Amino acid sequence: MPLTPETLPRHELVGLDVEVVAASNPDVVGLAGRVVSETTRTLAIEGADRVWRVPKDSATFAFDLDSGETVRVDGERLVARPARRTENTGDSQWR
């Protein structure tokens, strides 16, 4: 399945460029970098000076796709174990 704005929440996020566009913690708003790790509840974003762990459920992220599009995703949609999130909802021929 190709990476599109509609399928982004079901894809692997590690390696994508991202920016935190809204968050309950004002210190992480505007943080931009590359996703280097993901857990059930956090994204690890490598910024200019360090790796930040940002809680998914209290932030909104803007991901840059290879097509040049930017996709905003409410972090609540991403809260799940990464392996489980990528296999849920759907059209997989293996389920």
Image: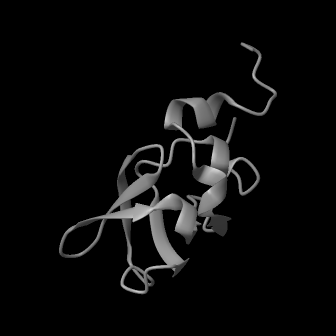
| Residue 76 visible, this orientation | yes
What quarter of the picture does the C terminus occupy? top right
| Relative image position of residue 42 (x, y in whole percent) | 43, 54
In the picture shown, does residue 78 fall above or below 11? below
Q: Residue 92 sits in which quadrant?
A: top right
Q: Position of residue 74 (x, y in %)?
A: 65, 65
Q: Which residue lies furthest to the right in this view?
A: 91
Coordinates of residue 3 in the picture (x, y in percent): 65, 47
- How was this image coloured? one colour
Tell me where residue 80 appears, x and y as whole percent: 57, 41
Which residue corresponds to the image point at 43% horizontal and 86% vertical from the top-left?
Answer: 26
On the rendered structure, is 44 left or right of 81? left
**Left or right position of 18 against 86:** left
Instruction: Say which of 66 and 25 sits in front.
Output: 25
Q: Name the residue located 23 percent from the left edge and 75 percent from the top edge.
A: 48
Residue visible at 68% across and 41% down in the picture = 2
Tell me: residue 9, above or below residue 27. Answer: above
Q: Which residue occupies the extreme top position in the image?
A: 94
Residue at the image point whose x is 51% and y is 79% from the top: 24
Q: Quadrant of residue 89?
A: top right
Q: Does 2 sit above or below residue 88?
A: below
Check the picture and name the quadrant holding the N terminus: top right
**Where 7 falls versus 65 (above or below)?**
above
Residue 3 appears in the figure: no
Asked where in the image residue 17 lies, by quadrant, the reply is bottom left
Badge count: 0
